[in-house]
Image (spheres, coloured by chain):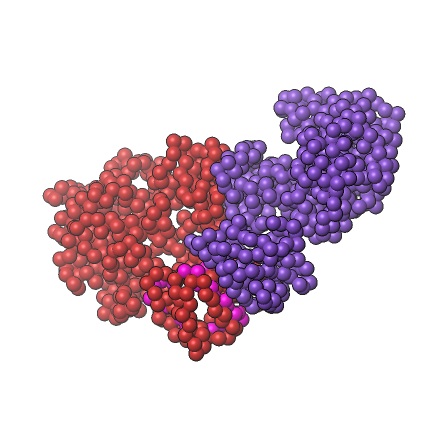
Chain colours: A red, B purple
Amino acid sequence: MIIPVILCGGSGTRLWPLSRRDFAKQHVPILGGGSPFQRTLARVAADPVFGRPLVVTGAGGRFMAADQAAAAGVAIDMLIEPEPRDTLPAIAAAAEWAARRDPDAVVLVLPSDHLIPDAAAFAAAARRAAAIAAAGDLVAFGLTPSGPATGYGYIRPGAALPSGVRRVAAFVEKPNAERAARLIAEGCLWNGGMFCFAAGAGRAEIAARAPEAAAAVAAALDGAVEDLGALRLGPAFADAPKISFDYGVMEKTDRAAVVEADFGWSDIGDWRELWAQSPKDATGVALEGDAVAVDCRDSYLRSDGRLVCAIGVEGLAVVDTPDAVLVAPLDRAQEIKGLVATLSAGGRREATEPARVHRPWGWYQTMDLGDRFRVKRIQVAPGKKLSLQKHHHRAEHWVVVRGTAEVTRDDEVILLRENESVFLPLGCVHRLANPGKIPVEIIEVQTGAYLEEDDILRFEDDFGRG
Amino acid sequence: MIIPVILCGGSGTRLWPLSRRDFAKQHVPILGGGSPFQRTLARVAADPVFGRPLVVTGAGGRFMAADQAAAAGVAIDMLIEPEPRDTLPAIAAAAEWAARRDPDAVVLVLPSDHLIPDAAAFAAAARRAAAIAAAGDLVAFGLTPSGPATGYGYIRPGAALPSGVRRVAAFVEKPNAERAARLIAEGCLWNGGMFCFAAGAGRAEIAARAPEAAAAVAAALDGAVEDLGALRLGPAFADAPKISFDYGVMEKTDRAAVVEADFGWSDIGDWRELWAQSPKDATGVALEGDAVAVDCRDSYLRSDGRLVCAIGVEGLAVVDTPDAVLVAPLDRAQEIKGLVATLSAGGRREATEPARVHRPWGWYQTMDLGDRFRVKRIQVAPGKKLSLQKHHHRAEHWVVVRGTAEVTRDDEVILLRENESVFLPLGCVHRLANPGKIPVEIIEVQTGAYLEEDDILRFEDDFGRG
């Protein structure tokens, strides 16, 4: 039995405007279906060799991760990092957590934002790695390169072991194209960021190579508290050095082995990669959503709702979202990071927040914004409720368009069915809850002189927000 | 005194998705300001040589034309064509209308969708043309070509006249590039579609060269009725052959003269032309609205609200509207017409209707659309009211977010101020009116199983709709 440890703390912007700081790549629905995180869950759920996954995530992404796991129908354990500290502390905490339950358990560390379409080949490779790991080695996955990619690190295999695999001679940083070609010629493999080890052996090796981190995560687990179905690590976690597991442990240990794997794999690190992984027509055009291509070639056109039409473009990504549109050559997809940094520095909300803002209770999205009003669509999951709150600068109308809502307004509690509405005057204390079995959706019309999220005074909250 | 006759019946799609069948190019705001129609009005309003303009338009565009004229602060007369019959019947009707008032009046026929930035040069050319026209000639404007354009027709000047201008030897159809270069070498001029003649002389020439059209428009004027401040031509108008004024009169008359004009002129016939007319930065990039260009060249980026970002594109048009996005090379802008035809044949609403639908009383726009609900923003102009109506399949909530609305609901009349709302149950007879001095805006939340515009039963209407 292998315990998948899924690292879900990243927040990439390289798929902007689809992914944002507050809507990480691993949670973005892609390829017409689930998110990379959900695909990772499905991959391990598909083979009985894998046990219940442990998801390690940040405070910001925890509800999204839990919601997406629930939507995928996969039961998970969850560790919440008080702050992001790169992969070593995350993996160390997972190793400590697993070793405390069973030091002989084999854990398989998986990024949550990678794509491995062939689940059977993946499971076979995991079994091979687990067999080596059970004997005490720390096993990295070396992916057979399909070309001199410059976006990945490389693993240089070393001496052969009796088990048939090889030691890791070195981890190589992302190379330029020329060096990448040379590395491949020398037999190097792509570093897929996947690691397999027995919990006890991994913990011991981390303690030997990164003692500060080991101590910090042990203390963080000692101080961990149950928090709405997850385990929130204690504040000692912040004492762990911010460092990657490759650099802090795998490069230093003399027990690193590499299992070569040749399943198709992608880190979908930018639009070019996502285009490469997408189904395409004979002209190399990938369409997602309501997109129309006329005489285009080798392009990626994505709509989130609007009609997107392209004529005669080549090698281009066109990505439409409710609040931002990106047009860029696939070959320059790496430059998006810089664009987003510039937008972010300029205070553009679109750089960091998605149009649909996810909350522990569901989500909301601004659909219309005028001079003194704002219209939102709000969805509340079954059994969830928003905080008891009031606003100083706005009144709100709520119209239920789906499901049944329970509305608290000062001293009243009102049950609102589809097509019913309520008015919440400025200053009233109110709360929206979904007592039902299906999601409730409301249209909220706010009116007032100031309509930002920070005009909120919370009295009670199921999710511990002040 | 020159009477400008502004032809406002066109419905171009070459600036799609900005222009649509139901939102013609002449009414689209461009270059950060007014529409081409409004710019045409402003051009003639700027010089005292021009009298009150006569706008000839279709039934579909009449309210838009009246609204935009009012917004531009220009008083107009208006003839409404019962159906579009190309330019000859429209100009013949205008000539007949003007000649009945004063046969010596000089009229200047102007397309409503062209751009002439230099109003003074335009007025000077109009004065020259009017002087010739007063003597009985039909004067065309020949624009000095700035290059071998293939998008325009050409005028070949002929024999010199004593007045200093020349006869028209021939009107030449849009040429290919090679022929265009030859035409220019031969001294041909662009045909700007502008004509100047004395009303009586023009009427006589039309009667001689296009007697059917002359008879039809005379009968149509005899049968015209006052209609909400405009003159609606009678049904005889449909008897006029569908033909252009160039082809049906100017090519046949022996009184055609051409005044050469060298003011800057553009028919903004496609995105490339609009880009050419737009202010651009040093790299040739024109931005309109909330658009960001990183390392782009010679491109046109337009946003209608969303953040539009382009990286490293060259020679590209990116046009974002609330319901459709277009990406196409400026050099292939001519292919948009075909795309729109295909979309239209496929029943795509976006091909023909704009997101913001203009009505005689104001406009509405769908802001959100779900499974069993639709959210609209509705604006009603001061003093206007919608029809008294009911729906069989939907209920509506109205929330006033600006101004004061007068709502009729069955037997009640309710005055709703900002931040007040009303519920209109399925089947109730209702009406929305703006009794105030500023526009009223409401958010309408519709709920029901069928939410299309055709679920409407009208009882009374200020605008004669059934």
Q: Is residue B428 visible?
A: yes
Name which residue lies at 76% across and 46% down: B77
A413 in the magenta segment: no
Q: Foreground residue, A33 or A438?
A: A438
User: Where on the picture, by quarter, is residue B150?
Assistant: top right
Quarter where residue B268 is shown: top right
Residue B47 position, x and y percent, is 81, 45
Coordinates of residue B464 in the picture (x, y in percent): 65, 50
Judging depth in this view, the residue of A49 and A110 nearest the camera is A49
* Residue drawn 88% across the image and 31% down it: B135
Q: Position of residue A226 (x, y in %)?
A: 26, 69
Q: With respect to residue A77, does A327 lie above or below?
A: above
Image height check: is B90 above or below A448? above
Name the side, left or right, on which B453 lies relative to A10. Answer: right
Region of the chain picked out in magenta, as a range: A373-402
Please state the total of marks drawn on the protein image.
0
Q: Residue at x 67, y 59 (%)?
A: B382
Residue B35 position, x and y percent, is 67, 46
Q: Is residue B271 visible?
A: no
Q: Quadrant of the C terminus of chain A?
A: bottom left
Name the residue: 46% across, 34% down: A296
Residue B424's place in the image compared with B265, above or below, is below
Given residues B339 and A44, the one toward you in this image is: B339
Majority secondary structure in the magenta region: strand
Q: Closest to the observer: A264 or B91? A: B91
A465 relative to B221 in the view: left or right: left
Residue A375 on the magenta segment:
yes
